Image (cartoon, rainbow, N blue to C red):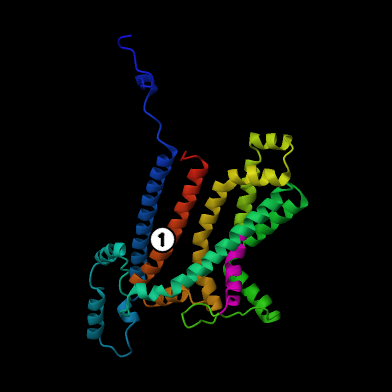
């Protein structure tokens, strides 16, 4: 028939084809990445501005006793402190794409200053994150297996109490119990020739001091996510069909709760790396905590911003990964 449409040819009423889930997820990830990078840039600008507001400057903080006013003026010029802070920040930011984190107030490349301690901090934070993930999922599932029971109430109450403990309090208690009273674990971290901890035993207490508060936080998140997922209609069908309790948990509850659990773990990444500064100081751990403390004392904007940049990049990567997990779990519906 004249004017008839060939079979399979789209009609005007059919409208545009839907965007594939993979493409939607990729576009969503690109938008999230752009927002995260913009947020990190704003944070770095705030760091430069905050250091500028501190009393004194890097030239005076790093000066030798007896230096004259002319010497200080010359040092300020060499450090670029006589230039506007916005101009210094822009010069520092333009070097980031090439991996140039600038030069510290003492004339050393920031990248070199962070090359040894930052991997140690990543090791500490990564182990603490792994312990947090395993323990919180195990405890949350354990409590969810008997909702409203004695074990569920005990886990929820314990998680709430642990969540309220700061890292330094947990660290002091751990040192008191496992180092001073029982002498099972070392309280101070010794450094090997390559700058890493000399023994794995020296990692145990710092990792636990970081992980324990986050275990409390994430156990509550896991338990709440499982409780919400248990209200879904397909769960009742699975129970009616007579599936074993553990199979309902692993094949029906956990997959649906995965996006919420991933978001909680990603949030803990920032808390772990932030708390690492305090924990490293208590255990004399060779991480970026001592570097950051010295940088603040020296009013060293490039070094402080370098620490924030590399730490922020790690946190941003983990947050983007969590966003992708949520997008994947929802089938690209973001």
Residue 18 located left or right of residue 259: left
Which residue is at the front of the view, 166 or 289?
289
Determine the main secondary structure of the stretch shown in magenta.
Answer: helix
Which residue is at the front of the view, 236 or 304?
236
Residue 115 forms part of the magenta stretch = no
Which residue is at the front of the view, 308 or 18?
18
In the image, farthest residue toward the bottom? 66
Q: Residue at position x 38%, y 58% from top? A: 40
> Quadrant of the image for the N terminus?
top left
Residue 200 forms part of the magenta stretch = yes
**Residue 279: x, y in percent?**
54, 72
Q: Which residue is mark 1?
A: 313
**Residue 179: x, y in percent?**
65, 79
How many labels were placed on the picture?
1
SS class, disc 1: helix
Up-down relation of residue 122 to residue 15 (above or below): below
Residue 241 in sight: yes
Up-down relation of residue 206 to residue 1 (above or below): below
Residue stretch rendered in magenta on the structure: 199-216
Q: Residue at position x 62%, y 51% from top? A: 222
């Amino acid at each position: 028939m004249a004017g008839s449409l060939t079979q399979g040819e789209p009609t005007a009423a059919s409208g545009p084809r839907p965007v594939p889930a993979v493409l939607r997820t990729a576009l969503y990830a690109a938008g999230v990445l752009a927002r995260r990078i913009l947020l990190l840039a704003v944070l770095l600008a705030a760091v430069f501005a905050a250091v500028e507001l501190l009393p004194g400057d890097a030239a005076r903080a790093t000066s030798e006793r007896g230096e004259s006013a002319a010497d200080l003026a010359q040092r300020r010029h060499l450090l670029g402190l006589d230039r506007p802070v916005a101009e210094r920040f822009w010069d520092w930011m333009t070097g980031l794409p090439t991996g140039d984190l600038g030069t510290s107030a003492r004339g050393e490349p920031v990248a070199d200053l962070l090359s040894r301690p930052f991997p140690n901090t990543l090791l500490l934070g990564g182990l603490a994150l792994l312990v947090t993930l395993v323990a919180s999922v195990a405890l949350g599932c354990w409590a969810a297996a008997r909702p409203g029971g004695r074990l569920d109430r005990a886990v929820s109450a314990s998680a709430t109490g642990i969540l309220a403990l700061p890292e330094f309090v947990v660290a002091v208690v751990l040192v008191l119990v496992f180092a001073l009273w029982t002498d099972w674990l070392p309280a101070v971290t010794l450094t090997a020739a390559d700058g890493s901890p000399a023994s794995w035993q020296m990692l145990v207490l710092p990792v636990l001091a970081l992980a324990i508060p986050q275990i409390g936080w994430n156990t509550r998140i896991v338990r709440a996510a499982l409780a919400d997922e248990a209200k879904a209609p397909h769960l009742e069908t699975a129970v009616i069909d007579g599936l074993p309790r553990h199979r309902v948990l692993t094949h029906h509850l956990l997959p649906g709760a995965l996006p919420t659990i991933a978001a909680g773990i990603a949030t803990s990444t920032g808390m772990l790396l932030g708390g690492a500064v305090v924990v490293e100081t208590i255990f004399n751990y060779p991480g970026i905590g001592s570097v950051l403390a010295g940088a603040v004392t020296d009013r060293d904007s490039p070094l402080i911003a370098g620490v924030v940049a590399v730490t922020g990049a790690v946190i941003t990567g983990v947050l983007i990964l969590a966003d992708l997990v949520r997008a994947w779990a929802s089938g690209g519906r973001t």
